[in-house]
Amino acid sequence: MKRVTVGTLESSDCQITVSPAKTRQLSIDSVVKASFGEAIEAVIHRVLDEAALNHVLVEVIDKGALDYTIEARLKTAIKRFEEADDETELFVHTG
């Protein structure tokens, strides 16, 4: 199954995985979810809207990344996802 993961689990960073889904789905595990969960979701939805992606599962493991880091990681994951064939499972360590 096509699945692309980018990022790290280091402090102030995040790891984002994009894979196919029947609808747009988000899974967010964040150390700051109580305070910034809605803002993280907003960034993800904005980037997905810009890319016109509605049939993906986006899984985020956040270690306190700022919004521009989340955006950059997601854009990289989307680019790799769109380039990948249907059997690709790709992990890009972008530390």
Image (spheres, rainbow, N blue to C red):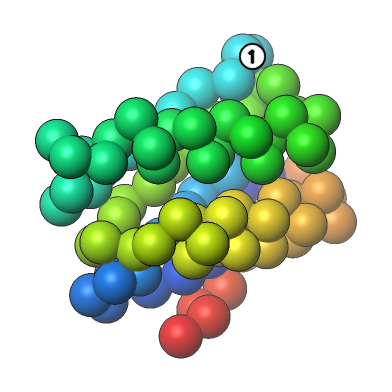
Q: Amino acid at mark 1?
A: Lys
Q: Answer yes or no: is residue 87 visible.
A: no
Residue extending furthest toward the top: 23
Q: Answer yes or no: is residue 68 visible.
A: yes
Closer to us: 28 or 82: 28
In this rendering, is residue 76 above or below 87?
below
Direction from residue 74 to residue 62 in the image, left or right = left
In this rendering, is residue 5 above or below 53?
below
Q: Can you say which quadrant of the picture contains the N terminus?
A: top right
Closer to us: 63 or 83: 63
Name the spot of residue 40 as percent of width and height, x first. 40, 41
Direction from residue 44 to residue 15 in the image, left or right = left
Direction from residue 88 to residue 11 in the image, left or right = left
Residue at 49 percent of width and 65 percent of height: 69
Name the spot of residue 48 as percent of width and height, x first. 68, 35
Residue at 57 percent of width and 55 percent of height: 71
**Secondary structure of the residue carrying numbered label 1:** loop
Residue position for label 1 = 22
Name the spot of residue 55 as percent of width and height, x first. 69, 22
Q: Dot 1: few (<14), some (14–19), or many (≥20) neighbours within 10 Å?
A: few
Residue at 15 percent of width and 52 percent of height: 31
